[in-house]
Amino acid sequence: MKKNHIIALLIIAVVLILDSIAGIEFREMKIQEKIHPTKTLTKESSLSEYCTNLQGKSGDAKIYFFDSGNLGATVLVLGGTHPNETAGFISALVLIENMDIKQGRFIIIPQACSSGFTCTDPMEGTPQSFTIETNSGPRKFRFGSRVSNPLDQWPDPLVYSHYPSGQQLSGFETRNLNRSYPGRSNGSFTETVGFAIMELIRLEKVDVAIDLHEASPEAPIINAIIVHEKCREIGASAVLNLEFEDLQYALEISPKKFRGLSHREWGDATDVYPFLMETSNPIQGRLRGKTNSILITDGLDDQYERAVRTKSFRISYELAGEPLSLRVGRHIQGIKAILDSYNEYSNDKKIVYENIPSYDDLVENGVGSYLR
Ligand SMILES: [Zn+2]
């Protein structure tokens, strides 16, 4: 065999090996993590039950129902609206894997934009997954993209025109679930997901809905609870009670003219009281240095530390980092405060549940202690 042939064969072999590795990684993004609900789970369903157009599609996110059987309030919690905002998804899992429901109902969607969990954002260099140590061993979870996978919705228009307001945003936002409410059943892929969630809120007569997010440490709205104006008192009393527990949350009122967001559209179109929470997540920041799976879980970043020490920017970043356990702790404690406050304001309907760890529990023991 000539030398050239041997080189050509070697190149083909290397290409095949690299292709196989890439193929395995690509397939891994589609594998669903195992979730282990508590015994109080009464039903497992998915969004296509509320919009049949989602049947068989990757937007057909799973829904977990915890019904006490005792008359009370219905609460919806959404994690994973933005699959690169890990604390939202993991907080929803902590609820699902610890919930003991006593009165009313919890409906939990841990990966609301399930399509976004099957890819990562281009040009960000983010990892595809991260690991949390639990008492029964390590568990691997996916890290996703802010928006739906382009394989599910493509191409993006130059300008995204929100339905039905006509508000214009950059074309990329056409795949952003939290710009796609109220959505429509026959609209774009992401609009269909938004529509299904709106239908769930209407048909299940949800009383309180909480959408869990994260943002970069330099974002203007951070460590905050954003409320629709109709439930500002509930939000204000929650923030005050959190302050007594030494936890600071800014209270923001949903802007009336910014359309497509959960806290605006859910509240305008249905009877629900909507809330959205934000924590500070360095992996989403422009200033971040080394981007790897440890940054997701430990939330420690040299560049943010430098920015705090030199007072270069106005940012929400603790020198000890923004670890996942703390960010999940803030979400969980925020949910508890909102629901306590709702119970005080509501005369007839209450939500009562047990066994959910507190902020202190999560920070002290680590989030892995509360995942099965
Ligand atoms: Zn978000």
Image (cartoon, rainbow, N blue to C red):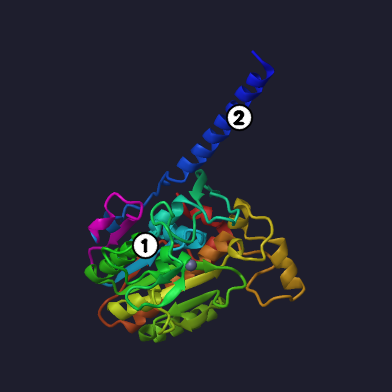
Element at label 2: helix
Q: According to the image, label 2 marks what residue?
A: 14
Of tags 1 and 2, which is closer to the observer? 2
Label whose residue precedes the other's in the sequence (1 or 2)? 2
> What segment carries the magenta color?
51-70
Where residue 42 sits, quadrant-wise, is bottom left
Q: Nearer the viewer, residue 34 or 167?
A: 167
Q: State the image coordinates of residue 221 (x, y, percent, origin top left).
A: 54, 77
Q: Is residue 52 magenta?
A: yes
Q: Nearer the viewer, residue 99 or 4?
A: 4
Q: Is residue 71 at all visible to an observer of this figure?
A: no
Residue 121 lies in magenta, yes or no?
Answer: no
Residue 20 visible at all? yes
Residue 12 got which mark? Answer: none
In percent of the image, x 58 and y 26: which residue is there? Answer: 13
Q: Quadrant of residue 229?
A: bottom left
> Residue 190, labelled with which disc?
1
Q: In the drawing, does residue 291 fall left or right of residue 255?
A: right
Q: x and y percent of residue 33 in the render?
A: 43, 47
Q: Is 230 on the left or on the right of 250, as rendered?
A: left
Residues under labels 1 and 2: Cα distance? Answer: 38 Å
Location of residue 323 in the rendering, given as x and y in whole percent from the top left corner: 60, 61
The amino acid beneath tag 2 is Val
Disc 1 residue type (three-letter): Thr
Q: Given contact means CB atoms under 8 Å apart, are the residues at marks 1 and 2 in contact?
A: no
Q: Is mark 2 within 8 Å of ligand 1?
A: no
Q: Residue at the spot x=51%, y=78% of the render?
A: 242
